Image (tube, grey):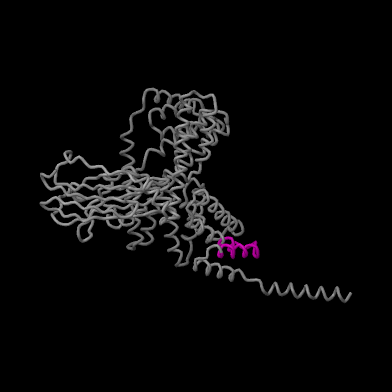
Amino acid sequence: MKVLVRCLIILAIIGSANVVQSKTLEEYIKDAKNYQSSGKLEQAISTMEEAVGEYPNSSMAYTYLGQFIGMQAQKMDDFSEISKVIDRTFDMWDKAISLDPNNFTAKFHRGGWGVSVPEFIGKLELGINDLEFLINVFEQSPDPDAKEQLVSAYHLLVIGYQKQGEFQKAKQSWEKVIEMAPGTEYADGAKRNINKIVLFEEWQSQRNKRKKPDSPTITNLKEKVQKEPDNTGLLIELGKAYFDAGNYEEAEKVLKGAISIDSSNLNAYKLLGLTLGKIAMEGYDQRIYMDTDFRTNLVFESMKFLDKAVTLAPEDIELRFLRGALGVNFPFFVGKLEQGIDDLNMVVKSNAPDSTKAEALYWLGFAYQKKALSQWIEVVSKYPDSKASQIVFDGLHPGVKRVDLSKYRTPIVVIDFVLGLTDELAPQTAVWIEDRDGKFVKTIYVSGFSGYAKEVQVNLPRWATSSEFVDVDGVTGASIDLGHHIYVWDLKDSSDRKVKSGEYIVKVEVSYWPSMQYQSVSATIKLGRKEERKVVEEGNLIPYLEVKYVPKGGK
């Protein structure tokens, strides 16, 4: 009996010791913040995981855990892994808000992330709802700090509205900011953003005017659909007619309408997946400025519909070929390369026509080429100073050709350079001119994403700082890639005025993703009466830059 009592006393002492040693939630949060500020994010996350275990009913514990997990996602490059971490981040905030619906901190995080992450993540509407809820609360709050929180909430809400294409709501939100903070930098920024939306709407209006009028076939089908709006067959027929006419946006609307009526229609899913793929491959335009994830969302949505179609008809060889070809063509972050290879192998082994098998084999070769390239990118990213890395660059290095000057009226400056690497995606590149004092003169070329995204982009920091995006629309083009490129400067500035004689600096900047490889080079050239040539050979990404001034009458 005495032994039993003694054991119970010992257990009681141990139990009480554990209670004394356990930390308060505030202490857990403080420790996690300290870990995070010192660069130990994993320890910050594990600390808050302990806090959640200790305080499973604490809304704030889940709030902070979600915040630190979100920070982890921001440091990652692998899209498939990022998506998983983002899902976990939202799970934490969902739990926090389920425990306390008035946890404004969690709602602000969830709302801000909901409108900021790519739309294919599926959190856009949730984010907008959270921010609208917070705005309603802040507007009624007597707290002086609520005004600043309100401005921040409107800034984020505009992102969501623009992704939805709700530009009128976006403008109204900016007008609210002007009303709340007149004469401040917030109001000035709001005015600039309203002007940007107006310019975008004008571009959109002009674009719509350039569209071809509906053909008699489409007009006839539209009349039939008006009489039978729930006729899925007619809707698919109309969608196909729009697709054949190259009006993919209208085709998308019609086909999504068909799916909303019949969610198991194979033909609708198949054609819709192909339609969205076509839109995604059209290239960059001003839509990327309003939503930098515009094309990313398209490719994910396209594959989502094709996956659904394959679920409905797994033995459909035509569908497998379509999904396979798109899968190996889509960017790496869609994560469908291996699936595309499997689809194409299935086509090759089937009784499909020889012409289809031949195409499938071609795209299989393309896919394996991409896989090989991924290995080379890993070499130059992880082991940049190795002999193997130099072998990669030597193997990719293209020969340098010359420009036919007879096609141009002199005086001119010929800018001749090589891009020495190809990544999972074509790089962002800019070519521009500065005077001898470093003052911006003119952009000669900039890649589509950076040119249209303007200040939203972060890929080309030197060009962005120098140009301030002056007059870039006319020189923004499709992204160039590995190889030799030549541009000619006609000695005019961004205002189309001839520059004076003297020294000028030609600059080339390139940024690769996801390998994060970056290089910029420059060459100074003197404009005058004599011909001049400068060659810069440094680095591997832009291994060769030749700048040649050809005076009037020169050859």
Location of the C terminus (image quadrant)? top left
Query: Looking at the picture, how far across and down is residue 216, in whole percent?
Result: 37, 23
- From this view, report whether residue 36 is shown above or below residue 535: below
Query: Looking at the picture, how far across and down is residue 403, in whole percent?
Result: 22, 42
Tell me the magenta residue range. 43-64
Location of the N terminus (image quadrant)? bottom right
Q: Nearer the viewer, residue 247 or 542?
A: 542
Q: Nearer the viewer, residue 35 or 369?
A: 369
Q: Residue at position x 58%, y 34% from top?
A: 311
Query: Looking at the picture, how far across and down is residue 384, in whole percent?
Result: 41, 55
Q: Is residue 158 visible?
A: no
Q: Residue at position x 52%, y 39% from top?
A: 304
Query: Looking at the picture, how far across and down is residue 170, in whole percent?
Result: 40, 50
Tally the marks.
Answer: 0
The residue sitting at the front extreme is 387
Q: Main secondary structure of the magenta part?
A: helix
